[in-house]
Image (cartoon, coloured by chain):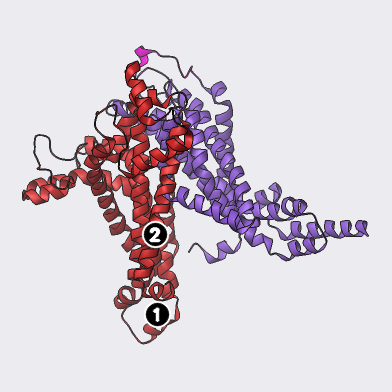
Chain colours: A purple, B red
Amino acid sequence: MTQDLESVEVSVSNLDQKNSNIGSIRRITKSLSLGEKVIFLLIFAILLGAVFGKYLAPYDPYFVNLKDSLLPPSSQHWFGTDVNGRDLLSRILVGASSSLLSTLAVIMFAALVGTFFGTLSALGPRWVDETIMRVSDVALAFPALILSLGFAAALGPSLRSAVIALALTWWPGYARLVRTFVLEVKHREYVDAAKVLGVSRRRLIFKHILPNALVNLYVQITIDVSAVLLVISGLSFIGIGAQAPSAEWGALVADGRNYILTGWWTVMIPGAAICVTGILFNLAGDALRVINDPTLVRKGEK
Amino acid sequence: MAKFVLQRLAMVPAVLWAVATLVFFMIKLIPGDPARVAAGRNATIEQVEAMQEKLGLTKPLFEQYFSFLSQTAQGDLGTSIFTFRPVLVDLMQVLPSSIELVFAAMLINLLIAIPLGIVTALVRGSVTDVVLRLLTLIGATVPVFWLGLVLQYLLGAKLKIFPISGQKPSGTQIERVTGMTTIDAFISGDFILFSQTLRYIALPAFVLSLAFIAVSARTLRSGMINVLDSDYVQLARAKGVSKIRMVSKHALRNAILPTFTILGMQVGWMLGSTVLVESIFGRQGIGSYATTAVLQKDIFAVISVVLVMGVVVTLLNLLVDIGQKIIDPRLRVSGG
């Protein structure tokens, strides 16, 4: 009898797999247009740059050489040099790891904690739900920049503080999102079916509810990259994030701001790096959203 | 209506308490000895000990918490180790200037977003979609501090259309009445000076607004589309109501409501962004006060900025909620 139930359960979980819009990588690549494929390739390249930047850098990004101070972009120095004669391309490449990896760390933490509290909120007792939602109300009413500014100031200025501060600030948004997704999935028929079959609560949550509730989460994660990147670089810009001689992109803009009249590239290029990265991740997020919800294509954006 | 206002007002202390608790938690996060941090880098041992006494660090945690709450409730946010004045006095001094900037940014936001929202709702097609999408992308990805520097360089230093930084022409005196430079210049009756101060505020306000224009325009647009597709507008159209009247009388009034909520939240976010904009343009304000405090390692002053902004945002949300009730008669009846 138990064996029977087991096999029925397997077929039920096969069913929700089929119903769900979890796409295999192949399915995703198949439904992408050429332009979108290029976007994903560029993102891949940027991530490679973030991981291997220090090996790719043509010069030592920290080597001060006042003789070469503020050289404009040339074939020697593609992006020119900063006031200390450091090669800007090398610094941007190394800075990519500070900027992007810390951004990803924030998002991963926020998504994990948010998923935990969001699920708890959706499935737990009423008072747990109320508490979590009221806490997130307060946190979300605050501008993220200000809240993380306070935390980072308390922890002492450093990129690590900025990451921790931002992670503490960012999770309530995910908690709300996950709560909505879980509540929506909770009442689907296959969940009821699994429940009737006597599936354990843990198995129900981890096997049936969460996998289907979280498929939409990666769209938000992709789009959030630019938002978090903006706050991280903003914190570094005002001096509470990455500290000198770090090449974090916001810190690079801050380094260049006093020399913009004699060396516009020291400000323009790091900022452009932030923009381009943000734009790519945003476009990728849009593409993923359309794959998840094909009706969007027909309706157009409202 | 009165009942609703009272209900919302009753919520305010609870939220303020939550904000204060959050800030207390921040202070507790300070590694090492907060008294040393509060007393400043060059403080003597006696000063540090006095600060320990003042902060009550020798007392048990919950006692510290309650004395923090009562001090904060009385407006005692400590003394800045940089200006040597009470932080609250400092903040009240610069807050009007930030409010002025946020107000100007909101004005620019509305002046662009409302026409854009209406036009893109009426002319639905590829061109308007592209314009909105582009603006959205720019708003979501361009760092505001970078935009400030770039526009300052291009429009200020190169083309000389706008002054590079500051709030008024150097050498001019404006008597402080409200603390808002443009308003004070207006009150002084010198209209040339007034127009000059407007030129000073224009660029930072535009920089501050850019990230928000697309969001407001899109919210208004989707509200407009919902209303324009509704039965009563179709009826009005069938009865031959002119297009202008249809938009202004029927559609816009109803579509502005969801937009109103968004605008209220945006004021809070804009106030937060002053931290990135004000110091670039050499403007006084709560944002540049925070950046200076960061550079001076005046941690308690930074945390006080968080507290004050939290209070401002809370009160703003209250105003938005009540304002919405006043605008929308339906909420007045069904809400209670």
Task: Label 1: state its secondary structure.
Answer: helix
**Rendering coords of residue B52 (x, y %):** 38, 25
Looking at the image, the residue that sits furthest to the left is: B189
Taking B268 as reference, is A71 above or below it?
Answer: above
Dot 2: few (<14), some (14–19), or many (≥20) neighbours within 10 Å?
few
**Rendering coords of residue A291 (x, y %):** 62, 55
At label 2, the amino acid type is: Ala
The subunit letter for the residue under badge 2 reads B
Task: Label 2: state its secondary structure.
Answer: helix
Check the picture and name the quadrant holding the N terminus of chain A. bottom right
Badge 2 and badge 1 in a common chain: yes
Decide which of tag 2 and tag 1 comes sooner along the chain: 2
Q: Determine the image quadrant of residue B315.
A: bottom left
Side (left or right) of B156 relative to A279: left
Viewer can see residue A144: yes
The residue identified by callout 2 is B10
Specify the principal SS of the magenta part.
loop
The residue identified by callout 1 is B233
* Residues drawn in magenta: A59-71
Tell me the tag on residue B7.
none
